[in-house]
Every structure is written in structure tokens, then in C-alpha cells.
Amino acid sequence: MEEAMKASQQAHTDALQAWGSLDNYVQAHGSFGTEMAQIGPRSMMSFTTDINVARSFGGTVYSARIPRNQVILQTLPGAGEAEVLVPHMIAVTRL
């Protein structure tokens, strides 16, 4: 786990440098999704606060309780998925 955290922290530092700011990185996360791998590994996980949005994606839905001060709100204009992001790793529960 320690190695994974170190790798995620380095990926986050690299992404902030590549995108120029946290806000730019957050918006890129919402705009480009999996295409971001062309720039480098992602250091943030995105999720929705709306269970109906989560279910609309299909597949397994997971749940986590994360303190508000640890999440980053998606700032992309027009984003409608109630998306928030959290850097690095979190524990989740399968619903």
C-alpha cells in the first residue's frame, strides 16, 4: 500500500505540473476521462453523490463515506453528474 500511495502522490504532482493547476486538472478529469492516460497516470478517483447517476452507468455501484474536506468538487462548466473527486486511495463498500 505504501508503494501505491507514493506512486499516486508522484502521479498527482506530475499531473498538477502538466495541467498547470488543480482546477485545470479537475476539469481535464471531467473532460477527457480515460484519454488522460496519454498525459500520465491519474491520481484522482471521481464519483457521483447521486445514486441514480451511479446506477445509470451500469455495473456495480460502490459506496464510501468521505469527509467533505477531502473531496474536490468538479468545476467543469455544464458538468451534470454531481461529480466529485478525491486524490489517491479510498476505501469503498460494494452495494
Image (cartoon, helix red, strand yellow):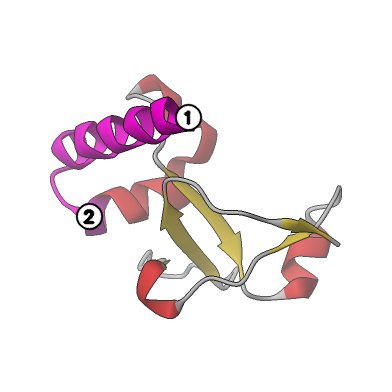
Question: Residue 73 falls in which quadrant of the image?
Answer: bottom left
Left or right placement of residue 16 versus residue 5 in this view: left
Q: What amino acid is labelled 1 in the image?
A: Glu
Question: Residue 17 falls in which quadrant of the image?
Answer: top left
Q: Which of 93 and 39 is in front in this view?
A: 93
Left or right placement of residue 94 versus residue 10 in this view: right
**Does the magenta-highlighted stretch encompass residue 8?**
yes
Q: Tag 1: Cα neighbours inside 10 Å, few (<14), some, or many (≥20)?
A: few
Mark 1 falls on what kind of element?
helix
Dominant secondary-structure state across the stretch colored magenta: helix
Q: Which numbered disc, 1 or 2, marks the residue that appears first in the sequence?
A: 2
Q: Tag 2: Cα neighbours inside 10 Å, few (<14), some, or many (≥20)?
A: some
Q: What stretch is highlighted in magenta?
A: 1-24
Taking the spot 44% from the left edge, 29% from the top edge, the residue there is: 4
Taking the spot 46% from the left edge, 70% from the top edge, the residue there is: 78
Residue on which disc 1 sits? 35
Residue on which disc 2 sits? 22
Taking the spot 20% from the left edge, 42% from the top edge, the residue there is: 16
**Does the magenta-highlighted stretch encompass residue 41?**
no
Mark 2 falls on what kind of element?
helix
Tell me where residue 32 appears, x and y as whole percent. Answer: 45, 40
Give the Cα distance between marks 1 and 2.
18 Å
Tell me where residue 2 appears, x and y as whole percent. Answer: 41, 32
Q: What amino acid is labelled 2 in the image?
A: Leu
